[in-house]
C-alpha cells in the first residue's frame, strides 16, 4: 500500500494541497520523483536520502517512486522534502505514526537532517486551514509567520528525528507559538508633520489619498517630491484584516518576511529605481515572483524620475494599473498577482530640470520632446498633475509645522467612508477614482456656475471628454472631503488647478 | 537634364563660386559636362586640378541615383536658371546653383531673416514670437535655419500667424536635425518652404552650418540677430548679410 502524506505548494499568492504518495517496488534500488517537479523538487531525492541516513534509518534498497499529486500541475520548491521523507519512512515501516492523515508537512531538509525555513509559509498554512488540515508540522524558523493564521495547531520542529519522535507520540521539544516574543508594532517614523511648506502640494496629496486618485508631481530637483510621496501611506486609511493578510502573503512568497515578523499592518511603499528591469517591476523571473507592482499592492507605488524609465517598462504598467492585477506567464507556470496600488510619480519639468525658472534654457521643442517620453496611456491614468515649486529654506523656518498624519488620516477616512456607502452596491468600485461614466451622471451633477467654469476652461485648454471626466471625479472627492452632498463651484475651482502639465504644454511655442 | 546639375554640384573641388563662373561661361551644366579641354583652359581662374576633375569625372550614375532618391522622397530641385530662383539670392556670387526643396515655392516681395541663440530665455522667446508675427501680418517672409531656440520660435510663430516661412537646412532634406523638430519640419514641408544645398542623405557637420548661414543671408532682404553670443553661428550669418550689402539689426 502506498503511503500518502499531505503537503502544500504555492500558485501565485495562494497555497494549494499536494498529496505526496510513496511506493516501494522490488527491483534495482532507484528513486524517482514524479509530478512535474522543477529542479529543486528533483534534487529533493538527494536531500531526503541523506537526511534519512543521518537520522539513523536505512534507505530502502528497492525501487522507490514518489508522486506529487495532482500530477498535471507544475510544482516548484524545496519544501516537499519533509513530507517525502515521512512518506518513505512510513512506507518502509520504520515508523508507526498514528493518524498521519491529520497532519500537513512542510520543510526543506538539510543533509544532516535539520529542517530549513522556507518562503511562502503563510499562504500554505491558509490553504491548510481551508482544506481542514488543522495540524501542520513545519520548520521552527517558520513558526512566527505560520502562527498568524487562526484555528491551527502549528508544530515547529528542528529536525527530521524530532518529527519522527513527535509522530510516534514520544516527548519532544516543540516550540509553542505562545512562547515567541511578539515584537512591538513599530510606529511609522515618517509623518506629515515633518513637512514644512508645500501646502498646495499637500492639499493635492490629501485629495489623491481621499479618492484613490493617481498623481504626478512636476518640479525641479530637491523641492520635496520624494519626501512627501514617502509619507502618503501614513494618511491612507488603515488596512482591513483581509488587506493585511494579502500583503503579508505577497511578501511571504517573495521571501521578504524576516524571522520574528508579524502580520504586515503598514501599507507598503515601493520606490523602484528607474533602472529597474521590466520583470523586476511587473513580476517574473524563472519562478514568476511578484514584481514591484504587487509588492505595492494595497499601498503606494512611487516612480521617481518618470521620464528616465524606459518606454517599454512604462507601457507594461498599463495592465497592472488598469486591471489591478498582473498575469505573468513564465517557463514554470502562469500566475496572477494582485496589484491594486496608488500610483504616485514625479518628473522634472524639462531636461535641465529648472523650467520655468530663470535657470532653464531648454527650447520649447526640447521640453515637449522630453515630456513626450511618457506615453499617452500612462498620462491618461494619472488624475492629478501638480507643479511643485521650490521652497525657500529660511522662510520655512519661521512657519509653524503642518498638520500631523493622524489628523489628515481622519479626514481621508471620513471621505472614504462616504465613498464606501455610495458604492456599496457597485461591485469592484470602492473609491471615486474608479467611478464609471454612468455613475458620474448620478453623483457628479453640477450647478450652473460650476458647469460654465468647467466648460470655459475646457475649451481654453482643449480638454478632451476623458480629461473632463477625470476632473469630475476629482471634484466629487473634493466635495466628499468637506462632507457635502453636491459639487460646489469651489470644488471645480480647486480641481482645475490639477492639470499643471497640460497647461504648461499648451503654453509652449510649438506646432501642434 | 537635371542629373548634370547634380553632377556638377557634387564634384570635389568645384565649389559654388566656381560653379557660378562655369554657368556664366557655359549657360548650363550639360555644356560643362561636354566641354573640351581647350574650352576649359579659356576660363581664367580654373586650376589644373579642377580642370582635370571636370574632364575625368564623367560618371553620371551617382547623380542619377540622387535624382531617383529625390523623386522617391518627394524632394524637388530648384536650378539657378529657374525664374523662381529669387533674384536677391541669384545676385550673390557664391549662391548654390542647385537647391533641393520641399514645400511651397512662392514669389517673395520682402523677406527678413531671424536668427539667434539656441538657448534663450522666456523673454527672448516672446520677443522672437512677436517679431515673427508682426512680419507675417505684413506679408513679409520669415527666413531662418530651423535650429533650436530662436530659429524654431521664429518659424513656429510665423506659421501660427498664417505667414510664409522658409527654413534653410544644414543637411539633406530627408534628415531632421535636431530630432525634436520632427513635427515642425513636417508642417514646414506643407505650409512653408524647406531648402537645402545638400543632396538627401547628407548629415549635418561642422562645416555645413556656416555654409547654410550664407543662404539664409542671401534669401533675406534684412537680418535680425537675437541674443547671439560672440562667435556664434548667428554672427556668421550677420557677417554674410553685411557682405551681401543687407541691413543687419541686433536685439
Image (cartoon, coloured by chain):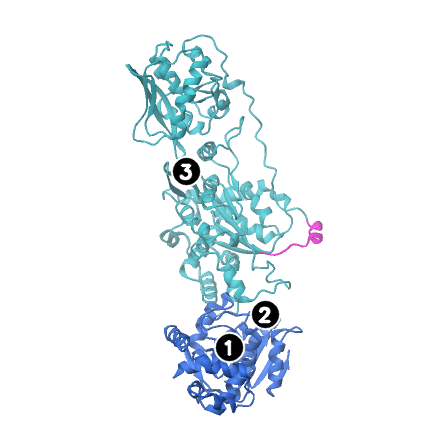
Residue at horizontal 44%, vertical 17%? A51
Asked whether the viewer can see residue A435, the reply is yes
**Viewer-nearest of discs 1 and 2:** 1
Which chain is in blue here?
B
State the extent of the magenta-drawn residues as a range: A388-399
Image coordinates of residue B133 in percent, x first then y, are 53, 79
Q: What is the letter of the cyan chain?
A: A
Question: What distance separates the C-alpha of mark 1 from that of mark 2?
Answer: 32 Å
Residue linked to disc 1: B12
Q: Position of residue A99 (x, y in %)?
A: 35, 13
- Quarter of the image for residue A428 reads top left
Residue bearing mark 2: B118
Tally of marks: 3
Q: Determine whether, in the image, residue A417 is placed left or right of residue B116.
A: left
Tell whether label 3 touches label 1 (CB within 8 Å). Answer: no
SS at badge 1: loop
Task: Using the image, name the chain to which the residue with label 3 belongs.
Answer: A
Q: Earlier in the sequence, mark 1 or mark 2?
A: 1
Amino acid at each position: 500500500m502506498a503511503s500518502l502524506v499531505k503537503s502544500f505548494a504555492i500558485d501565485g499568492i495562494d497555497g494549494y494541497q499536494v498529496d505526496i504518495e510513496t511506493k516501494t517496488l522490488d527491483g534495482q534500488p532507484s528513486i524517482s520523483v514524479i509530478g512535474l517537479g522543477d529542479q529543486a523538487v528533483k534534487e529533493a531525492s538527494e536531500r531526503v536520502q541523506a537526511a534519512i541516513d543521518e537520522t539513523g534509518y536505512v534507505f530502502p534498497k528497492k525501487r522507490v517512486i514518489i508522486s506529487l499529486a495532482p500530477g498535471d500541475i507544475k510544482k516548484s520548491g524545496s519544501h516537499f522534502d519533509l513530507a517525502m521523507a515521512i512518506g518513505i519512512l512510513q512506507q518502509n515501516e520504520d515508523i508507526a505514526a498514528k493518524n498521519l492523515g491529520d497532519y500537513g508537512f512542510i520543510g526543506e531538509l538539510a543533509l544532516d537532517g535539520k529542517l530549513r525555513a522556507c518562503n511562502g509559509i503563510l499562504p500554505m498554512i491558509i490553504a491548510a486551514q481551508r482544506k481542514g488540515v488543522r495540524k501542520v508540522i513545519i520548520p521552527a524558523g517558520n513558526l512566527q509567520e505560520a502562527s498568524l493564521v487562526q484555528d491551527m495547531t502549528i508544530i515547529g520542529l528542528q529536525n527530521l528525528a524530532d518529527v519522527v519522535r513527535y509522530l510516534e507520540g514520544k516527548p519532544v521539544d516543540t516550540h509553542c507559538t505562545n512562547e515567541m516574543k511578539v515584537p512591538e508594532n513599530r510606529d511609522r517614523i515618517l509623518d506629515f508633520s515633518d513637512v514644512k511648506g508645500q501646502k498646495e502640494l499637500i492639499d493635492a496629496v490629501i485629495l489623491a489619498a481621499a479618492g484613490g486618485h493617481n498623481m504626478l508631481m512636476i518640479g525641479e530637483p530637491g523641492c520635496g517630491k520624494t519626501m512627501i510621496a514617502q509619507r502618503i501611506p501614513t494618511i491612507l486609511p488603515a488596512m482591513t484584516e483581509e488587506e493585511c493578510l494579502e500583503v503579508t502573503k505577497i511578501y511571504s512568497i517573495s521571501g521578504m518576511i524576516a524571522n520574528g515578523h508579524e502580520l504586515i499592518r503598514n501599507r507598503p511603499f515601493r520606490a523602484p529605481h528607474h533602472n529597474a528591469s521590466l520583470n523586476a517591476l511587473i513580476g517574473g523571473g524563472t519562478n514568476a515572483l511578484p514584481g514591484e507592482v504587487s509588492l505595492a499592492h494595497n499601498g503606494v507605488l512611487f516612480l521617481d524620475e518618470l521620464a528616465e524609465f524606459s518606454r517599454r517598462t512604462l507601457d507594461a504598467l498599463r495592465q497592472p494599473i488598469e486591471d489591478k492585477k498582473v498575469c505573468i506567464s513564465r517557463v514554470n507556470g502562469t500566475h496572477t498577482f494582485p496589484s491594486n496600488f496608488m500610483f504616485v510619480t514625479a518628473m522634472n519639468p524639462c531636461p535641465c530640470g529648472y523650467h520655468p525658472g530663470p535657470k532653464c534654457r531648454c527650447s520649447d521643442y526640447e521640453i515637449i520632446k522630453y515630456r513626450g517620453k511618457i506615453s499617452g496611456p500612462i498620462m491618461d491614468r494619472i488624475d492629478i498633475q501638480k507643479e511643485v515649486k521650490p521652497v525657500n529654506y529660511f522662510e520655512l523656518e519661521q512657519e509653524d509645522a503642518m498638520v500631523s498624519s493622524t489628523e489628515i488620516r481622519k479626514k481621508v477616512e471620513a471621505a472614504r467612508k462616504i465613498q464606501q456607502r455610495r458604492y456599496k452596491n457597485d461591485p469592484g468600485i470602492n473609491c471615486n477614482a474608479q467611478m464609471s461614466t454612468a455613475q458620474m451622471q448620478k453623483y457628479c451633477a453640477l450647478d450652473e456656475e460650476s458647469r460654465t467654469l468647467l466648460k470655459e476652461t475646457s475649451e481654453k485648454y482643449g480638454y478632451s471628454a476623458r480629461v473632463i471626466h477625470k476632473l469630475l471625479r476629482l471634484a466629487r472627492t473634493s466635495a466628499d472631503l468637506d462632507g457635502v452632498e453636491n459639487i460646489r463651484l469651489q470644488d471645480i475651482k480647486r480641481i482645475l488647478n490639477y492639470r499643471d502639465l497640460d497647461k504648461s504644454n499648451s503654453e509652449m511655442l510649438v506646432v501642434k | 537634364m537635371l542629373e548634370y546639375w547634380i553632377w556638377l554640384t557634387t564634384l570635389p573641388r568645384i565649389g559654388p563660386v566656381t560653379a557660378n563662373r562655369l554657368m556664366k561661361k557655359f549657360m548650363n551644366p550639360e555644356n560643362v559636362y561636354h566641354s573640351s579641354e581647350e574650352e576649359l583652359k579659356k576660363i581664367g581662374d580654373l586650376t589644373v586640378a579642377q580642370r582635370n576633375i571636370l574632364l575625368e569625372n564623367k560618371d553620371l550614375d551617382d547623380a542619377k541615383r540622387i535624382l531617383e532618391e529625390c523623386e522617391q522622397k518627394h524632394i524637388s530641385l530648384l536650378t539657378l536658371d529657374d525664374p523662381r530662383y529669387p533674384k536677391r539670392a541669384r545676385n550673390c556670387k557664391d549662391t548654390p546653383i542647385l537647391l533641393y526643396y520641399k514645400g511651397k515655392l512662392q514669389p517673395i516681395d520682402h523677406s527678413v531673416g531671424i536668427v539667434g541663440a539656441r538657448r534663450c530665455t522666456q523673454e527672448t522667446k516672446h520677443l522672437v514670437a512677436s517679431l515673427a508675427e508682426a512680419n507675417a501680418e505684413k506679408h513679409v517672409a520669415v527666413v531662418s535655419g530651423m535650429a533650436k531656440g530662436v530659429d524654431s520660435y521664429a518659424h513656429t510663430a510665423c506659421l501660427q500667424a498664417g505667414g510664409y516661412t522658409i527654413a534653410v537646412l544644414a543637411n539633406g532634406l530627408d534628415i531632421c536635425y535636431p530630432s525634436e523638430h520632427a513635427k515642425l519640419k513636417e508642417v514646414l514641408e506643407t505650409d512653408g518652404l524647406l531648402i537645402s544645398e545638400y543632396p538627401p542623405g547628407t548629415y549635418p557637420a561642422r562645416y555645413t552650418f556656416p555654409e547654410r548661414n550664407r543662404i539664409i543671408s542671401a534669401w533675406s532682404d534684412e537680418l535680425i540677430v537675437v541674443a547671439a553670443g560672440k562667435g556664434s553661428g548667428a554672427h556668421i550669418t550677420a557677417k554674410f548679410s553685411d557682405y551681401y550689402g543687407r541691413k543687419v539689426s541686433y536685439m
